[in-house]
Amino acid sequence: MEALKDVRILDMTHVQAGPTCSQLLAWMGADVIKFEPPQGDATRAQLRDIPDADSLYFTMLNCNKRSITVNMKSPEGKSVFVDLLKKCDIVMENFGPGVLDRLGFTWEKIHEINPRIVMGSIKGFGSSGPYANFKAYENVAQAMGGAMSTTGVPQGRPFVTGAQIGDSGTGLHLGIGLLAALRHAEKTGQGQYVEVAMMDGIMNLCRVKWRDHQRLTRGPLPEYSVGTHQGMGAVPRGGNDSGGGQLGNAIRCAPGGTNDFIYIVVQEAVWEALAKRIGPEVHMPELATDPMFATIAARREHQKDLWEIIGEFTLNHSKREVMAIFNEINVPCGPIMSTEDLAHDEHVNLRGMYVELDHPQRGKWHNIGMPIKLSASPAKIERSPLLGEHTEEVLKEVLGYDEAKLAALKSAGAFSAPPRRRGAGIE
């Protein structure tokens, strides 16, 4: 049986952060009802590559869900929402501050409707504090959570990371919180409000930088290639420095293309084997015992020279060849894998991490697979839903509505946007 088979989630989230969370829970077996406005999640139309088809932005974040459309601006639509709240274990939202409150559904009201329900909420900066009403996007959260100030070339401009740590990272944090609150509700009969702020999540993901922030009050950080000193205040941008106790860096390989690099970590335990393997090829047979590199303290002091020596060796080999050579002597390393590399990688394929699906509008496409492997209940990945595809199914199956009630709600506009008045502007 799927791990979350009996869990039903009313998912009002949109774009990326919330859908990341609900998709993972759906892959673990939860019945996720994607509760959409009549016009649908905005990402259905964003960055379209096929006309009139749901975009990859939408399909890659909404697999294994059922979609219903409800007009929350109509009394009838609100009544459907209330009925669904009574039948769900979790409700999720990532609206701007105050949106649900203005519709008449504060957390207190939702808790009153269903005392057992867990409510998950994603906000840019949380519901309290001076920044509570500020708008946030992925890169804004990276900027304000500490990630950008520590990412990039030393003395250069800050950079965002390509990993969506603000959106998808926050979704992962929310998933942990929801499952903990669900466990609590099962034991006590009482649901609770679970809030994750994007800024807070990024601060958590930057944990080792906060380690270094405090170490700077006591002395320099010798593992950084850029100079640091006691009292300098902020943790610097370290480029490709490992940021850990062992030295690491990205080193260019043959034939010298954009992604022809390999990341190497020079652990103290493997230095002798590494030096003996590369030394003869770079005309330094005594490299292992060279005083400039013989100890970890010496290698830290002369790390610029160290990387140049290793780079002389790697330029004679492709990144895959270097990976094979270094893994034979237990040197931690990994080639810089592009999206093209990963899409055709044997390991990725065997791990089920790039999965082909079929969609009625767009045909064959690929999604990232389930990163959490459950031995007794492995995920089965299914396509994303069309807009409103399961409206009648959910209302009949979950709420027990009959045809007469469905027809009455339809005619009252519970599932569709009201017709626009002539001359009316876009709200």
Image (spheres, rainbow, N blue to C red):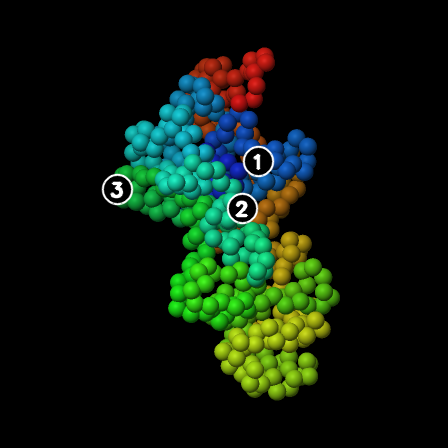
Disc 1, SS: helix
Q: Is residue 189 above or below residue 312?
A: above
- Front residue of 337 and 228: 228
Q: Residues within 10 Å of mark 2 (few under 14, many from 20)?
A: some
Q: Residue furthest front?
A: 231
Dot 2 amino acid type: Asn
Residue that carries the numbered disc 3 in the rendered image = 188
Count of numbered circles in the view: 3
Residue that carries the numbered disc 2 in the rendered image = 139
Q: Is residue 10 left or right of residue 427?
A: left
Mark 3 and mark 2 lie on one chain; the one further toward the N terminus is: 2
Dot 3 amino acid type: Thr
Residue 248 sits in quarter = bottom right
Q: Is residue 85 left or right of residue 95?
A: left
- Mark yes or no: residue 57 visible: yes
- Front residue of 2 and 99: 99
Place of residue 393 in the rendered image (x, y in percent of width and height, measured from the top left): 48, 28
Residue that carries the numbered disc 1 in the rendered image = 43
Dot 1 amino acid type: Thr
Disc 3, SS: helix
- Mark yes or no: residue 7 visible: no
Q: Residues within 10 Å of mark 1 (few under 14, many from 20)?
A: some
Of marks 2 and 1, the one in the foreground = 2
Place of residue 173 in the rendered image (x, y in percent of width and height, measured from the top left): 43, 48
Q: Is residue 14 above or below residue 284?
A: above
Place of residue 184 in the rendered image (x, y in percent of width and height, measured from the top left): 30, 45
- Front residue of 98 and 76: 98
Q: Residue at x 53, y 46 (%)?
A: 139
- Front residue of 220 and 105: 220
